Image (cartoon, helix red, strand yellow):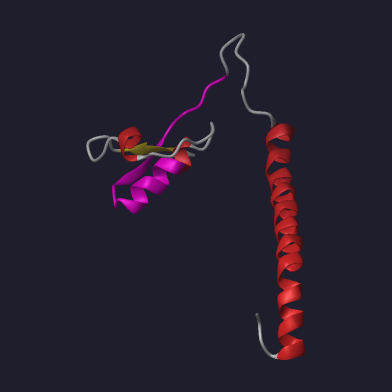
Amino acid sequence: MGSPIIFPDTVNFPAASSIVFPPFRAVSRMKQNCLVLKQPVTEVEVSYGKRMEGSVSKLSTFGDGFRIPSMFVVFSYLAGLALLISAFFGLPVLIEYFRTGFVT
């Protein structure tokens, strides 16, 4: 498995990117930025060793795994709410149009 290498001589990434992103998305955002700006990217083989004694992982398998579906639920509720609000305001206009052929 390789790790991405972003060539620093082509652009100053923090200055070029005005988006603030959460942890663990930095590599994907940098790759995206390089693709947009047509910058070279390559992967280099890296050997991973054991974790240092006393260190703790910041990753949470279940917590991070539930974060993605929970966002779908939140946005689904927001979309449903937007649908109800638009129906509330739009249906009277459609009813009037089908009754009279005009909208006043």
Which one is in front, 99 or 53?
99
Residue 86, position as x, y percentages in the image: 70, 65
Quarter occupied by the C terminus = bottom right
Identify which residue, 102 or 46, lies in the foreground.
102
- Spot occupied by residue 35 in the image (x, y as percentages of width and height): 36, 52
- Nearest the eye: 39 or 36: 36
Q: Which residues are magenta?
A: 29-50
Q: Residue at x 35, y 53 (%)?
A: 36
Spot occupied by residue 75 in the image (x, y as percentages of width and height): 69, 51
Q: Which residue is the extreme one toward the bottom?
A: 101
Residue shown at the point (77%, 88%) measured from the top left: 99
Which residue is located at x 45 percent, y 38 percent? Answer: 27
Residue 32 among those drawn in magenta? yes
Q: Is residue 61 left or right of residue 31?
A: right
Count of marks placed on residues: 0
Instruction: Point out the residue furthest to the top here.
Output: 54
